[in-house]
Amino acid sequence: MKLGLGFAPSEAPGHRVTPLIVCWFSFLSWNLPFSIYTNIKTNKGINIMHKCIYTKEEFESASKEHILQNFLGPKWVSKEIVSNSAQEIFGKEIDLAFSKPFEFIRNQIDAKTSRGRDAPTIKKLRGDDSSVIDLRPRGKPEYAEPKIVTTELENGRTSVQVLCADPSMLPWAYKKFIEMFPNSGVTQENFLSNYKQKSGLMNESFPVNISFGGKDYFRGAMKSVFNLLGINDKELALQEIFDPVRNFILKGVGESHEFVSWPKETASRLPTLSDFSHLIAVYSNGTSVEGFMRLYGCIEHLFKLTDEYDGEPFCYSFLVDPLRLSSTCEIRNSVEVTTLSLPSFDSGTNLPNESTWAFYRSAIQNFGIAVSKYNLTLDFLKKIKEKLKESGMSDQDSAGICDGFKPILFQKLREINDQNQSEISSFIIDYLASVTMHKQMPQG
């Protein structure tokens, strides 16, 4: 099933994009891999063989498989649980389907991949008056095509303003101008001579639509949960009771609603590393084996891997701060994540409904608030660095202080009202005084 969310950035001047919400629904499915060790004696000694938790094929070595997908920014990888043949299938299909809906969220906070690749640019959005806009990382809009704005003057003449992202667009802009005003008599030379480079705020509104769900999307989501089981207990993951979910992930056999339920409320008793942290978990009360996922602090899913488990209760988890804002950016099997703190599969709904819509709307609104605070943090840090340099501090020292202050300031802004400028200013001055000590601190 697929849950669709639409975002309409606010029309207030400036480049900040404030996610607002609209919604719709639809559904999906997937499969998985495992690994186990077999010792084979050869003339050269002992080769360690592994078994793929998805295909169950044996292999000696494989490329690194991220336990949680690379686009989400984690560092934890394994060469022992997923064969190269399975990785190739996933890379062409379900990993792409899983990553696509998060492009806008990643764009808003400039969330890089674990390999350092930049957040995506959202291209060719349609703005006011059919303007075409690219949304750069951190939600910075720029014109993807020249925009020509005309204003009728009282004397019967027409004022023409041409807006471009950079000078390379000017020949294109002139062509559009001549198409609109073929008898203007303006030559390209005259047109280019009137060009003035200015930077300013864009006052445009434009819709951004994303949808969470679909069969391949959920296959990709469940892959990370099954990877977590495989890296913690390979022998269990290879058992036949997981063949249905394995086939769902690997081959798309089955339907999403057999393995996925939609949450109706936030799992509030779980730890976070930042407002944008990820958490995946796989756990059992001794009968069923279930999974949980929360991405970027807002998008949650519930999974069921099997109802046929008969063994000891367990709980494995992986907590990640994709922006590396906290001092500890990854925690494996946190003691704060337990079967009691995690929601059950049955606490969700089999198909999206009004409660699902309300849950995701609230989650995305909270994400928008967190983005605003994060952008405020970055703006403060930019000003702080400028003032430190004005005071005579080197680029290296000022950058080091700002890098160390970033997670502290971000956490402080999570705790206080960002409208309380005096409290924020006092906190910043006190911190900078403590880390610079004998250096003279800029005030204001």
Image: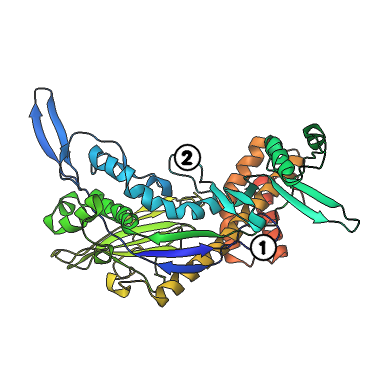
Q: Is residue 409 visible?
A: yes
For the point 12% across and 55% down, which residue is it?
A: 240
- Residue 207 on image: x %, y %: 57, 60
Q: Is residue 394 visible?
A: no
Secondary element under disc 1, as helix, strand or loop, is: loop
- Give the residue pinned by disc 1: 11
Hey, which residue is sitting farthest front in the picture? 183
Say which quadrant the C terminus sits in. Answer: bottom right
Disc 2 marks a residue whose amino acid type is Gly
**Disc 2 secondary structure class:** loop
406 horizontally vs 78: left or right: right
Q: Say above or below: 29 vs 329.
A: below
Decide: is 339 above or below 386.
below
Q: Crowding near pointer 1: few (<14 within 10 Å), some, many (20+)?
A: some
Of residues 121 and 237, the one nearer the viewer is: 121
Q: How many marks?
A: 2
Pointer 2 residue: 116
Assign the N terminus to one quadrant of the image. Answer: bottom left
Mark 1 and mark 2: Cα distance apart in space: 32 Å
Marks 1 and 2, the one that precedes in the sequence: 1
Q: Residue 312: percent from the left, percent from the top? A: 16, 63
